[in-house]
Amino acid sequence: MELKASRMALSRLTAARHRLEARKARTDMREWQVKRRERTRQLIELGGLVVKAGLVELADDDRATLYGAFLTIAAKLRGEDREKAMVLWKRKGKRAFEDQNCDHASA
């Protein structure tokens, strides 16, 4: 009888320990985990911009095409017209964000 009670107590303690470890893992804020989460969030946001710009549909979801386009943009940014391109693209992007915010506000 005592052995059965001990086993049950051990089983409950083991389950409680597993719950505690799982809760700790969900809230663990080690430096490498924080950096990984930040990087993951950045990648998701950048992917969202690709979708928002309509590039996925326009390129028929062809990753090689999209990558080639990004390489073209990177080459432009390494070139002499970097500043001009940055100003132009930033202006267009800001306008698009503002237009989108206006569309959502009126909807």
Image (spheres, helix red, strand yellow):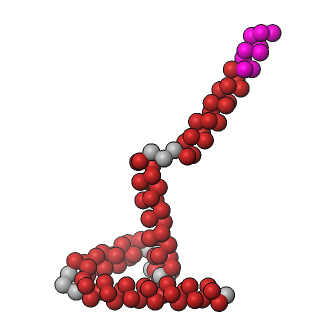
Query: Residue placed at 67% from the left, 31% from the top?
Result: 16
Residue at the image position 44 percent from the left and 70 percent from the top = 46
Residue 62 vertical position relative to residue 43 in the rendered view, above or below: below
Q: Quadrant of the C terminus?
A: bottom right
Horizontal side of residue 104 vs 49, given as left or right: right
Q: Is residue 23 left or right of residue 76?
A: right
Query: Which corner quadrant of the image does residue 69 belong to?
Result: bottom left
Where's residue 72, x and y in %? 29, 79
Would you say residue 4 sits in the magenta stretch? yes
Between 53 and 58, the one nearer to me in the picture: 53
For residue 37, above or below residue 50:
above
Q: Main secondary structure of the magenta part?
A: helix
Indicate left or right for 94 with 71 as reference.
right
Q: Which region of the structure is painted magenta?
A: 1-9
Q: Residue at position x 37%, y 84% from top?
A: 90
Q: Determine the image quadrant of residue 42.
A: bottom left
Q: Position of residue 23 (x, y in %)?
A: 60, 41
For the N terminus, the quadrant is: top right
Residue 82 location (% of width, % of height)? 24, 83
Q: Position of residue 30 (x, y in %)?
A: 45, 45
Judged from this view, the residue extending furthest toward the left is: 80
Note whether 77 is above or below 16 in the view shown. Answer: below
- Queried whether the magenta region covers residue 43, the answer comes back as no
> Quick check: 51 left or right of 20?
left
- The answer to whether one can see residue 53 in this image is yes
Residue 60 shows in this picture: no
Give the quadrant of residue 79. Answer: bottom left
Q: Residue furthest top?
A: 2
Identify the residue shown where x is 31% and y is 84%. Answer: 86
